[in-house]
Amino acid sequence: MWTQARSRSVIADDLDTLDPEQLRERLRASRAEVAFKQAVIDKLTHENAILKRLKFAAQSERYSAEQKSLLEETLDSDLAAVAAEIEALNPSTKPAGNKQVPRREKLPANLPRREIHHEPESTTCGCGKPMQRIGEDVAEKLDYQPGVFSVERHIRGKWACKCCEKLIQAPVAPHVIDKGLPTAGLLAQVLVAKYLDHLPLYRQEAIFERAGHVIARSTLAQWVGECGVQLQPLVDALAAELLRQPVLHADETPVAMLKPGHGKTHRAYLWSYCSTQFNPLKAVVFDFAESRGGQHARAFLGLPGEQGWRGQLVCDDFSGYKACFDLGVTEVGCMAHARRKFHELWANHGSQVGEQALKFFGQLYEVEREAATGDSKARLEARRRSRPVADALHQWLRQQRQKIPDGSATARAIDYSLNRWEALTRFLDDGDLPIDNNWVENRIRPIALGRQNWLFAGSLRAGKRAAAAMSLIHSAKLNKIDPYAYIRDVLDRLPAQPASRIGELLPHHWRPTASA
């Protein structure tokens, strides 16, 4: 109360120094901020109501048992994420529907316990007399090491001075889920299992039950939703740093998305952007979208716009990227896609044209293998040997095209290379450019392993949350970091990390704490 009163006094003193025009300007700015926040709160409240209706409707939808479980856990995560965002915008207002806080059951007595004591740095009162310990507060949090549950007992001693009637305690350490039951280790286990090991929450529920403690999947879903909100600023910082790089890879892969109210799925897309294998920065950012429209790539790159990214983009011939090239982005073709079309001719039909083309491509890739460990200058020097091979391939393709009728598979394979020849051979003049887009395709390939688990609710929120978590987890893998250790440490440190130093927690900057 004293702090609030003092703060109001300081504001009042500050206002006294302003002239009427400055006061009016500050009032307009304050009203605009309040209106903006209220608009966002109204939007989130509306979304919250829709999600609750969807959750109720899901009970009568004709889904398979697995689809129904996945839909319910996704809706629970979405509801928790919306509630966390509303609370962040207006801490004094609780989201509708949270009038009663459920009573937490005591953790089982049979679980092993580890006590962590929190005591004040000094127990000497300001009057000079020693304070006496008069009690303690104990908070229990559920921890998890793979296969084993344990309980952390956080004991905060209470110290009082009889002379001054003063009471002190060590402050409560901030937690990624305020007053939550799980430790950062348990939350990290849930996130990594879901987004790296492709284990939906209903399977994790069964795994935890075998480990000795039942955690309802609705509770797990709430944890996932709240963690997604907390991790988003870190993902935004990762994307901003990625967009400062001069060369990027881009690719996209289809993902099935459940649509509540329809009882079926439709095709959404997970877009992937990452730095090249030659870049010291090792990072990948996933972006979830409901479609394959090129507007999603332009939105991620900030196009159009003066501050939009206008580097060199390594990608396939997907038409969705074409508008980016008209807005200042330089196209870098994927030689592997060109080669793949001739390989299909040779493998499926024994084509002699395909076989000869593969020999040319083989010579180009042989140079790349030899120069892979060198620096940019060494690669550029080695690629001088590739220029005559590329020129010979180009001339040979043009000659073959004159002999082959339009519309055939061979004609389409040749046209793919000839129509994009400048983009395909741009790597020959720049040692920082890769020969193909395989680097990002290898980043996105593991996602296909979990496609049967990638069933999201109709809104973008669950897909965006998955993309954010995967961005951090897979970037950690790129930097040869154990994803579990990284996510655990980040969740532990994030609540107390200043916004100005959020970059320290990015995978390529991260340094583990002693306890990580």
Image (cartoon, rainbow, N blue to C red):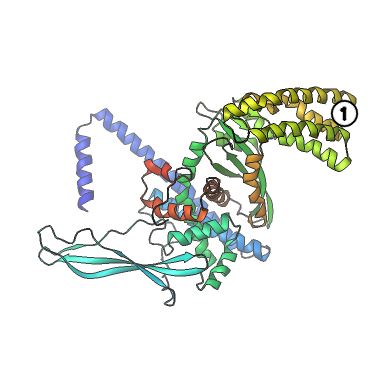
* In the image: residue 274, left or right of residue 448: left
Question: Against 72, is 8 above or below?
Answer: above
Q: Which quadrant: the C terminus?
A: bottom left
Question: Against 501, is 458 above or below?
Answer: below
* In the image: residue 312, left or right of residue 510: right
Task: Give, as a three-letter code, the residue at label 1.
Answer: Asp
Where does residue 393 sit, x and y in percent of width and height?
78, 26
Give the image quarter of residue 443: top right
Where does residue 493 sit, x and y in percent of width and height?
39, 52
Is 325 in front, or is 88? Answer: 325
Residue on which the image places disc 1: 406
* In the image: residue 144, left or right of residue 130: right
Residue at 55%, 45% (x, y): give it: 478
Where does residue 211 sit, x and y in percent of width and height?
53, 71
Where does residue 447 sit, x and y in percent of width and height?
64, 50
Is 163 in front, or is 77? Answer: 163
Query: Is residue 419 in sight in this rendering?
Result: yes
